[in-house]
Amino acid sequence: MKLKYYYSLFGYLFLVLTNMVEAQQMTSVNELEKFYKKHKHTLPNPSEGWQEVWIIMPKEKDFINEHQTELVNARVYVEDGVISKVYYDNDKYVENVYGIDKVKNGSASFQKVYLDLNYNVTEVFTAFTHKVIFKDHQADVQSPIERDSYHGNVVFFSNEKKVDKHGFYVFVKDLDNDDYDFLGYLNKKCKDEADCESLESLRIPLRRGNYEVFTVQNKIQFDRRMPMKKHDLIVAENQCQMIKLEANN
């Protein structure tokens, strides 16, 4: 009986190690799709927390792929089975995204949240579906940025009467490609910074450095523009800045 047990254990360990080697050698979407087809029923289906993943980047011509590769290693945050945040290695911040389905068979999808500025309209919208494959990673996946000692925090809050209806989108400008990355949405009212609780504010960890942050109020004006304000930020390590958001009159 013992010999049979050890043979079974050895077979299981061999299968796990084989899967891990296969996964570590993933370099193309074609290889990943073959791996996924073979192992999708054994891949994790997390409902909460940070997870290690592969992201298959969109192929549309209009999509600006700053990573210059079709397959990217990343981490995503899952809330109630839906992806809500993504972190690409070496980025200075965590990007919020719009999850479009729940995790199933080790896979899920999200779209990027865009800020479009032109002469006729200011618009916030979602586009370009990113497919995510979850890695069979058993260890705890740490929260990015905050595990790095070289970071500070920026906390946005507001005491506008109708902030629940006309909240604020927060974007940071990517200076490498002039794109805007979505950091979060604030729609909770807070009396003042001294009484502002975490659930009533938008707390954003950023690696130290200079940032151009744009806050866009969720309100369409007569000229089809949404009220917007620019914030030039200098983020220092281990420091916290409080920024009050107010409606533009």
Image (cartoon, helix red, strand yellow):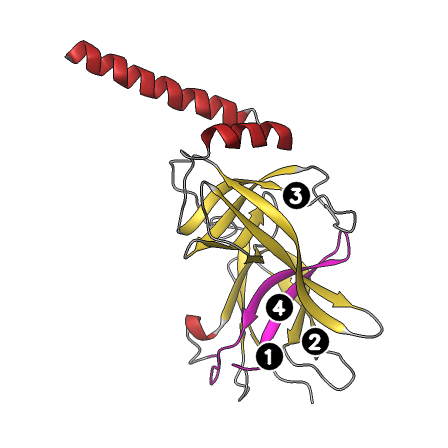
Q: Looking at the figure, which quarter contains the N terminus?
A: top left
The earlier-in-sequence mark between 1 and 4 is 4
Q: How many angstroms separate mark 3 from mark 2 (CA)?
A: 31 Å
Residue type at mark 1: give it.
Answer: Leu
Between circles 3 and 1, the one closer to the viewer is 3
Res. 170 mark: 4
* Comes first in the chain, label 2 or label 1: 2
Q: Amino acid at mark 4?
A: Val
Task: Mark 3 or mark 2: name the one nearer the start of the chain.
Answer: 3
Name the residue: 30% across, 15% down: 10
Q: Quadrant of residue 210?
A: bottom right
Q: Is residue 188 magenta?
A: yes
- Residue nearest the viewer, comparing 130 with 232: 130
Residue 86 visible in the displayed image: yes
Q: Say which element carries label 4.
A: strand
Q: CA distance from mark 4 to mark 2?
A: 10 Å
For residue 77, above or below residue 24: below
Residue pointed to by mark 2: 229
Q: Nearer the viewer, residue 169 or 14?
A: 14
Residue drawn at 72 percent across, 46 percent down? 66
> What x and y, as percent, mark residue 93?
59, 54
Residue interval drawn in magenta: 164-193
Which quadrant is the C terminus positioned in? Answer: bottom right
- The kind of residue on which mark 3 rests is Met
Give the residue displayed 43% in from the left and 53% down from the top: 81
Q: Mark 4 packing: few (<14 Cα in 10 Å), some, or many (20+)?
A: many
Residue mark closest to the camera, 3 vs 2? 3
Residue corresponding to mark 1: 245
Q: Can you tell which mark lies on residue 163? A: none
**Which residue position is annotated with label 3?**
57
